Image (cartoon, coloured by chain):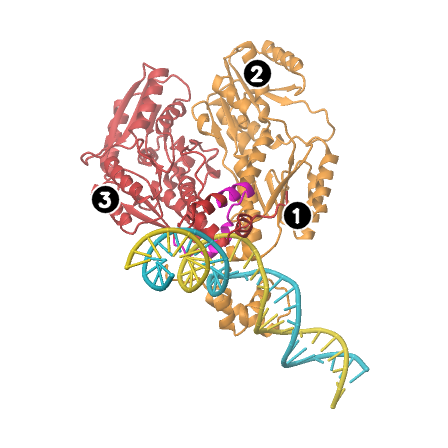
Chain colours: A red, B orange, C yellow, D cyan
Amino acid sequence: MDTEKKVTINDVAKAAGVSKGTVDRVLHNRGEVSERSRARIMQVIEQLGYSPNMHASLLASRKNYRIVCIIPEFHNGEFWELTEKGIEYGREYAERYGITVEAVMYDQYDLESFQKACAEVLEDCPSGVVIAPMFRNETLKFAKELHAMGVPYVYIDSKIEEDDYFAYYGMPMYQSGYLCADILTLERKIERIHIIRIERDKRGLSDPTVTRRTGFLDYIAEHYPDCTVDNTFIDPKDKAARFAKLDELFASDPDPYKYIVMFNSRVHFVADYLRAKNITTCRVVGFDVLDRNLALLREGFVQALIAQRSDKQTAAAITAITDYLIMHTVPAKKDNYTHMDIINRYNCDYYL
Amino acid sequence: MDTEKKVTINDVAKAAGVSKGTVDRVLHNRGEVSERSRARIMQVIEQLGYSPNMHASLLASRKNYRIVCIIPEFHNGEFWELTEKGIEYGREYAERYGITVEAVMYDQYDLESFQKACAEVLEDCPSGVVIAPMFRNETLKFAKELHAMGVPYVYIDSKIEEDDYFAYYGMPMYQSGYLCADILTLERKIERIHIIRIERDKRGLSDPTVTRRTGFLDYIAEHYPDCTVDNTFIDPKDKAARFAKLDELFASDPDPYKYIVMFNSRVHFVADYLRAKNITTCRVVGFDVLDRNLALLREGFVQALIAQRSDKQTAAAITAITDYLIMHTVPAKKDNYTHMDIINRYNCDYYL
DNA sequence: ATTTTTTCCGTTACCGAACACGGAAATATA
DNA sequence: TATATTTCCGTGTTCGGTAACGGAAAAAAT
C-alpha cells in the first residue's frame, strides 16, 4: 500500500508514446491533438489510474479563482453573523489553494439591493457562487445567468427547488416546525399556544418561515386537535409597542403557564419582556443560537432553541466549490439537509 | 488585497543577501549556518512576512508522514464503527498532503491487547497518533513514550486529564448525564427511574460511563429528591437472561408508565425487549446513534438518544495533526468538547 | 608556514504539472 | 512541383521549495 509510486504525467506520456505536453493538452482538452493520440492517452490514463498531483498543478497554474458569497447584511448578534463566520472558515480552506473568497451583502428587505448585488457579481465573473436567497424570482433569474456562464452556485439556508444548483446546505424547514412543536409541548396535552410573529409592513415580502409554521401547525393538529393557537404580531422596531402587545396577550390568557413559540431568531423579543416582568411560568421555544438568545436561555427565559450550524453549512458550501475547482469533484449529495440541533440550558455551553 | 504578491524564499534570500539554500537551512534549522546570517535571515523573514508555500514544499519534499489511530475493535453496528468512519474522512484529508493514516485496533476488554497495540505503534515511530484510551495507566505510560519521541498525540472520546496531550476531541461526560436526566424526565416530577447497566464480570475494568451516571444522579437528586432510582444489571451476551431480568423488573414495578435509561450505546437491548413484548408505555433514553438504536427510535421503542458526532471528532483529530505536520499550526483550543446532540423521532432522519 | 579540519554557503538537480513557443509532418493551394 | 497552411506535438522554462554536493574561507592542528 505504500510501494505504490504515484503515477505522474510523465509515466502516462511514456506509456502512450507521446510527450507530456500532449498529455497535458488532452487533460485540459485544449485541442491540437489528433483523435488517435487522444484516445490512446485516455486509455493509458485509465489503465494506469493516473490522477494529477494537486500540488504540482496548483504551483504551476497561475489561475485566479474567486468564490463570491451573497448573503443578507446584518448587525452584530444577528442571525447572519454566524453565516459570515462560516465564510471565514471556508476562506481559510480555500485560500490554501489560492482561491479568494469574498462576501457581497444585500438588504434582505430591499429587492433592488439584491438585484444590485447580483449584477455586481455577474459583472466580474466569479468562479463560483454561494448564495442565501431571499427573493425567489430574482434569484431564479440570477441563477439562470450563472448557469449560462458555467459558474457553479450553491444555495445555503434555503433554496429554489426547481433550479439546477450545484448543491444545497440548509435545514429542512417543514420538519423543523414539526420538531419545534414536539419540543414546545414536551409531549403533554396543552390547551393553548401563542405564536408570536413579526409584523411585516413591506409589500410582497414572502415570509421565510411559513413552511416552518406549517410543520408546527400540522404537528399540533395531529397530536392535539383541540389546542387553541393564537397569533400575536409584534413590531421588531418598537419595543414599547411590543411590550404593549405582550401585556395584552398576558391579560387575555388567564392560565399563568403559557406556551409561546417564535419561528425565527427573534425569540429574544419575547424573552426580554418576560425578563423585564420577571415572568418565569412560560415555556418559550424559538430558533437559532444568537448570543442574546443564548443568554436568555441560560437565565431561564427561553426553554429551548432549535438551531442549525449555519457556519458549518456555509463553510461546507465553500469547501464544495473549492474542491470542485481544484479537483473537479462533486459533493456526495446535492441536497445536504443539516441536523436540527436541540439546545437547552443543559447542553448550550458546548454548542459554539 | 490581491496585488500582494506572495513573498517567496527567493525574495527572502535576496533581501538577506544569501542564497535560498541558506534560507532553507535556517527554515528547517538543519544547521551549517553562521549565527550572523541566521539572525539576519530570521529578521528578513519577519519583516517581509514570509511564509512558505505549502504546495511547493509538499511537492519537493519526499517526507513520509504517517498518522496512526488506536481504537477499540468492533463488530458491525457498534459504537466504534462511527469512529472508524471518521478515520476515513480524516484520511481523505490527510492523503491530499501525502500523509497516510492507519488504524490499529485493540480489544477494549483486554489490557494485554492494548499494550500490544501500543508497542506496535511505538515500534515504527509514527508522525502522529490518535488514541481512544480505555486503560488509564497503560495509556499514560504510552503517552510518556510518545512525548519522549516528540510525537504529537490526540485523545478522542475520553482523555487522561493530567497528561500533556496535543489536543482532545470528545463529549463532556458529566454534563451528558445531567442532560440525559432532563431529557428522560421531560421536566415532570416522576417517582421512579430504572437504570439499566451492563454486568461487568471482568476484574478491574473501569466503567467508562461512571461520570455520566454521576451527572444523571445529581440532576435527579437536585430536581426530584424523592425519586427512586433502581439499578438493573443485564448480561450483554445472553438474550434470554436479559429478558428474564427485564421480566422481573416489569413485574416488580406496578406503574405501567416506566422511565428507563441506559448510559451507553446498548439501549437497544432494552428496546428489543419492549418491542418483543410490544410495550409502548415507557420512556426510554440512551446514548449514541447506532443503526439499531435509530431503528428502534423510529419505531417508538426508544424516545430519545443523546449523541456525539464521533466521526467528526475523529476526523478533526486527524486534521489537527495533519495541519500540524504540514503547516506547524496548533488547534485553536486544546480541549474540544463537542456538542451533545439530542435525537428524537422528529430530527433523527437528518442526523447522519 | 603548511596541512588538515570545520564551518559556512552557493550551485544544481529535482518534484509534477502548466503553458508558451517553435518546428516537423501533413494537407491545401498555387 | 513548389509554396503556404494547418494540424499536431516535443521542448524548455517556470512555479516555490528541498536537499545533496562540493568548494571557498576560516579555524585548528602540525
In this rendering, the answer to whether B143 lies above or below B350 is: below
Amino acid type of the residue that numbered disc 3 sits on in the rendered structure: Gln
* Residue carrying label 3: A115
* Residue carrying label 2: B272
Question: Which comes sooner in the sequence, label 2 or label 1?
Answer: 1
Residue count near mark 1 (Cα–Cα under 10 Å), binned few <14, some 14–19, many ≥20: many
In this rendering, the answer to whether B299 lies above or below B319 is: above
User: Which is the main secondary structure of the residues drawn in magenta?
Assistant: helix
Disc 1 and disc 3 on one polypeptide chain: no
Q: Position of residue B269 (x, y in %)?
A: 59, 19
Q: Position of residue C12 (x, y in %)?
A: 58, 68
A72 relative position to A343: left or right: left
A164 relative position to B178: left or right: left
Residue placed most toward the observer, D7 or B115: D7
Q: CA distance from mark 2 to mark 1?
A: 43 Å
* Residue at point 64%, 69% (across, down): B32
Residue C22 lies in quadrant: bottom left
Disc 3 and disc 2 on one polypeptide chain: no
Residue B329 at least partly seen:
no
Q: CA distance from mark 3 to mark 2?
A: 57 Å
Amino acid type of the residue that numbered disc 2 sits on in the rendered structure: Asp
Residue A58 at least partly seen:
yes
Which chain is indicated by disc 1?
Answer: B
Q: Position of residue B345 (x, y in %)?
A: 45, 22
